[in-house]
Image: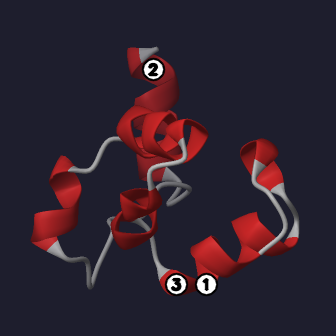
Amino acid sequence: MHHLFTHLCENHFIEPIRDYTAANLSILPGAVLARLQAGDPTWETMVPPVVVRLIKQRHYFGTAHA
């Protein structure tokens, strides 16, 4: 794995993430999914609004019609 990672970095296939919100780094995908599947609407505060719309429009993860 180390060689693969080195190759990807040296050939610029991996780029650093810029312009992020540090407060969002503590949000874990599993926590969002658990809230979503439990019907807890607070999951919507954990992802960008465009993602909320797509999940609801496309009924991902068993979401009901929005």
When the figure is inspected, residue 41 is found, relative to residue 8, above or below; the finding is below
When the figure is inspected, residue 53 is found, relative to residue 6, above or below; the finding is below
Q: Are marks 2 and 3 in contact (CB under 8 Å)?
A: no
- Can you tell which quarter of the image residue 17 is in? bottom left
Residue in the picture at 52% in, 25% down: 4
User: Callout 2 environment at 10 Å: few (<14), some (14 to 19), or many (20+)?
Assistant: few
Residue named by callout 1: 50
- Given residues 35 and 4, the one toward you in this image is 35
Rendering coords of residue 63 (x, y %): 75, 53
Kindly report the distance in space between the C-alpha atoms of the residues bearing marks 2 and 1. 36 Å
Rendering coords of residue 7 (x, y %): 50, 37
User: Callout 3 environment at 10 Å: few (<14), some (14 to 19), or many (20+)?
Assistant: few
- Can you tell which quarter of the image residue 66 is in? bottom right
Rendering coords of residue 48 (x, y %): 46, 78
Earlier in the chain: of badge 2 and badge 1, it is: 2
Earlier in the chain: of badge 2 and badge 3, it is: 2
- Could you tell me the amino acid type at mark 2? His
- Could you tell me the amino acid type at mark 3? Pro
Scheme of colours in the image = secondary structure
Residue occupying the far left of the picture: 23
Residue named by callout 3: 49
As helix, strand or loop, the secondary structure at mark 2 comes to helix
Mark 2 vs mark 1: give the one in front.
Answer: 1
When the figure is inspected, residue 52 is found, relative to residue 28, above or below; the finding is below
Residue named by callout 2: 3
User: Callout 1 environment at 10 Å: few (<14), some (14 to 19), or many (20+)?
Assistant: few
